[in-house]
Image (cartoon, rainbow, N blue to C red):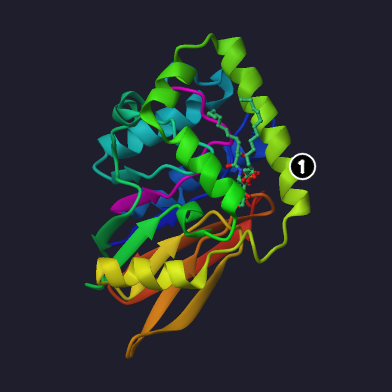
Amino acid sequence: MRTLFISDIHLSETRPDLTRALLNFLHHTCSDCDQLFLLGDIFDAWIGDDFIHPDLTPIIDALDTLSKQGIEIFFQHGNRDFLVGKKFTSRIGAELLPEESIIRLPDGQSALIMHGDQLCLDDKEYQQFRILVRNGDWQKDFLSKTLPERLEIARQLREASKEQNAEKSQSIMDVNADSVQSALKKAECQLLIHGHTHRPAIHQQQLNNQTGTRIVLGDWDKELWYLSCNEAGCELLHEPVNSTH
Ligand code: LP5
Ligand code: MN
């Protein structure tokens, strides 16, 4: 039994190298896995299930092929692709998971999984923004706009985000330690797996009288990061984006 986790690929038509890297990963690394978890920000900007850039259709087809081969695929929202809906996940044969989910790993351990943006509680501006854009009415209104309008809003938001991030400190944009503790406590888990911060690492931290583990997935900008779990445990692995099998 082998379970893989990836996040923060940020696929877009401007990065054909990432599309190629993911296709390669799906064809080779995933071919002998049983489960694939997509933990958010797979897409750089998702403006609705009714628009998929044609350059990304090979990815959609490859995911669909994997699920038809019996590999279970699970999708969680990131802060860039929170508008992914059931129309899209059923197109690829994936299950859309709640933003915080508890799963069982091949070695029997329970893990709490999430994108990770919800843990960045020191980033007050982002958390306010998050409440706004995760509101159902707000999303309905956005999705009722024309495609050019939605593309323009997404572009403006990306600009605003880039400008504001340049002003924020690294610590503000990392997870808040108390939010990690309380998320694990609430889930009654000792292992948290998330992405978002683009700071791949395995952290051990004190959790009441036990040791908690926090595995942070990496983004795919320069290297291709993934977590591979089997009966023996989990390994956080990386390869160059341009590697060929
Ligand atoms: O994404 P990244 O890594 O740059 O930074 C994130 C947080 N930013 C965001 C915003 C996204 O990047 C915007 C792209 C969304 C694409 C989907 C579009 C379709 C949906 C459209 C619905 C709105 O998530 C950033 C965090 C950082 O992670 C680290 O955690 O700091 O947070 C922000 O930048 C939020 C700002 O601080 C506050 C929001 C400013 C909004 C300004 C409104 C501009 C007017 C736009 C017109 C509607
Ligand atoms: Mn993110």
Vertical order, 96 against 223 (above or below): above
Query: Most prominent secondary structure in the magenta stretch?
Result: loop
In the picture, measured across the screen, residue 18 lies left or right of residue 71, that is right
Instruction: Determine the residue located farthest toward the bottom in the rendered image.
Output: 209
Q: Residue at x 56, y 45 (%)?
A: 9
Q: Crowding near pointer 1: few (<14 within 10 Å), some, many (20+)?
A: few
Vertical order, 178 against 9 (above or below): below
Q: Residue at x 50, y 21 (%)?
A: 52
**238 or 42, nearer to the observer:** 42
- Indicate whether residue 181 is drawn in magenta: no
Q: Can you tell me which quadrant of the image ligand 1 is in?
A: top right
Residue 244 image offset from top left, x and y in percent = 61, 49
Q: Residue at x 59, y 41 (%)?
A: 10
Task: Indicate the secondary structure of the residue bearing disc 1.
Answer: helix
**132 or 45, nearer to the observer:** 132
In the picture, measured across the screen, residue 53 lies left or right of residue 72, that is right
Figure quadrant of residue 129: top right
Residue 239 seen anywhere in this rendered image of the structure: yes
Figure quadrant of residue 187: bottom left
Provide the residue span drawn in magenta: 34-48
Please, what is the three-letter code of the amino acid marked with disc 1? Answer: Glu
Residue 46 image offset from top left, x and y in percent = 51, 29
- Return the residue at label 1: 163
Vertical order, 168 against 11 (above or below): below
Vertical order, 28 against 190 (above or below): above
